[in-house]
Amino acid sequence: MQKATIQLETLACPSCLQKIENAVKGLNGIEKDSVKIMFNASKVKTDFNSKAISIEQIEKAIEDLGYPIIKSKVKSA
Amino acid sequence: MQRYILQKKNHIMLISAMLIALGFLGRFGIDSMLIFNAALITASILGIAPIAIQAYQALKVKVVSIDVLVTIAVTGAILIQNYEESAIVTFLFLFGAYLEQRTLNKTRSAIKELTELAPESAWKQMEDGEFEEVDVDDVDEDDILLVKTGARVPVDGTVLSGEGHLNEASITGESLPVSKIKGSEVFAGTILENGTIQIKADRVGEDTTFGRIIELVEEAQDSKSAAERFIDRFSKYYTPAVLVLGIIVWLFTNNLELAITVLVLGCPGALVIGVPVSNVSGIGNGARNGVLLKGSEVINDFSKVDTIVFDKTGTLTIGNPEVAESAFYGNNKAEVLGYLASVERESDHPLAKAVLQEIGAAHFSTVEETEVVKGGGIIAQIDGHRIAVGNVALMEKENIVLSEQVKKDVQRFEKNGSSLVLTAVDGTLQVLMGIRDQIRLGVKEDLQKLKKLGVKNLVVLSGDNQGTVDIVARELGLTEAHGHMLPEDKSAYIEKLQADGQIVAFVGDGVNDSPSLALADIGIAMGSGTDVAIETSDVVLMNSDFSRLPHALGLTKSTARNMRQNIIIAVGVVVILLTSLIFGDWMNMSIGMLVHEASILVVILNGMRLLRYHLGGSKTNETEKAVMNQTETNSAA
């Protein structure tokens, strides 16, 4: 299990949160309960199974929604 | 393509503003409906593009967002050929989003300032022994790093060699430089003001004290109170409900214009953003002022506090009893002090520690036949002399005659609030010492400020004897004082207060008081920023600074009030818009969008006021505090 912290460009609308949350939770290999979108810090935190999904795939899902990613960090949890 | 359009949102907004201006110029300047329509249609289509993309993305992940409402409304307006409305509404929506972004960044500025203090790079010792600059993420525990003058310490570590002065303001809020030598701990985010040091990395990245503080503040800013979670759930269903309402209106009245107006008016903007914006500003203000507030639930609870319970030692007092005054009556001072030190060495009583600290190096002798007199002191034999160390009661019991001079000194010391330690050798009084624990600087004013802020009861609970506690309570104007309290007595007392329906905050040092900290409605830890207390409490006063407490309370009160104001503004706006839609005839889509965006800006600006919150008068008190320094009271252990 890996732990990802993804820093996004500043989020402005609270409905962005819902969008990102639903998108990330909809991916395979994501620990759904661990998904946390921080509005003010504009960060996404989630645990994921590195065998089922890569950090690049998670990043792509978020970027496809139109939220550019500044940087992401992965740690083993 | 999608991303390109979204990135150019601000440009689109500008172009659409110019097109709208051009259109109106065409219509009223040269009376050309062709220019008017052409310009406005272009503006509408340009403007709706980024909104429609966002709406599409939201629908893809099954979210009915505001973008969806606006897209449908604008499409409807274009269909009924009301280009004026469609152009103005899209422009206002984009412009509002732009302003929202700008002002929101302001409310987040406090935490941003903090994160910008995070070190980016480090000089790491490579295998060949040379130092090389690397990204801070590439530093691991046990790496050896070089910190140069003016640089930020990249990790938490221990000094291996060199020395210097560090500014630890980012951790403790205290800007006076601290001297560090070999073996000292250094913290990430602090600045080396002079010297050069080599350190060994103990904790890196998010595990450093600095990383934990940032994480904590970030999480606090996004934490939600029960009320907010309700609003969140509400808005999740609210937006789809507005959509359904719009469709119903259209089906029943066959009035598409009215239906799309409903869609625009129903946007829930200010309601969703109002409370978080107060929260983020309030917590940001706290973080900048040495007060860590852990989330909006804490803010709500603390703002309603009735009773604040203090631990005495280490909270109201510095927690380090010292010999404040002494008098000698014999001739052989060195010998007597040697006896005294030898006896006190046997004891672990706090007063004994203070005495030993005062004497320092002494000639220690073998102590025999030590007898502890409960509530009195110690009697022992050294080199055939009978030594009695203890209070006045012990001296009377030993039939030691106190001269007039001694009695006068005893009275004077007691009046100063000292605990007394008398030493007699072979029945003659030789030394009198007065020991005190100092009350923290300015605590009295701070307590008065708390009372002014509406705290009803200020209670001190202490393990000390009742007499000492009473003196502190009287000096500080506390409402209640209880001594002889064990940690479990303290938590039982808090439980009793809570059973009486009071909201109780407990202020302690977080180590031995953890049951009380956990049990109280609000646990406030006096933390040096490095304590575990950061994790366990609801509020942390950085650098153990008691004077931040009134600021913390005032801030939570203002923040809670600010949240209520924002809810009232948001709900009020929706109510006014809907009633005027039903009863008035001046309402249309553009005005609705204008009011809607304006209300969002109003709640953000209202929230931003909290960033500048400052408790009245707390700046001017610095001189008073210096004066207070002189006023010391008894509070020996």
Image (tube, rainbow, N blue to C red):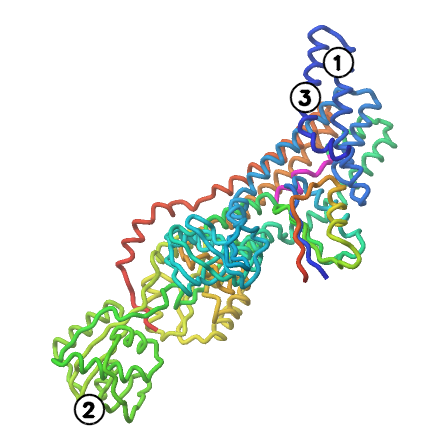
Q: What residue did someone put label 3 on?
A: B17
The span from disc 3 to disc 2 (Cα, nearest Å) is: 99 Å
Q: Quadrant of the C terminus of chain A?
A: bottom right
Q: Residue at the spot x=77%, y=45% of the render? A: B237
Chain identifier of the residue bearing label 3 in the image: B
Between the residue at mark 3 and the residue at mark 1, the CA separation in whole angstroms equals 13 Å
Q: Amino acid at mark 1?
A: Phe
Q: Which numbered disc, 1 or 2, marks the residue closer to the eye?
A: 2
Q: Is residue B109 above or below residue B340?
A: above
- Mark 3 or mark 2, earlier in chain: 3
Chain letter of mark 2 equals B
Q: Are marks 1 and 2 in contact (CB under 8 Å)?
A: no
- The kind of residue on which mark 3 rests is Ala
| Part of the protein shown in magenta | B266-275
Q: Position of residue B100 (x, y in %)?
A: 62, 35
Residue B267 belongs to the span the image colors magenta? yes
Return the residue nearer the eye: B73 or B457.
B73
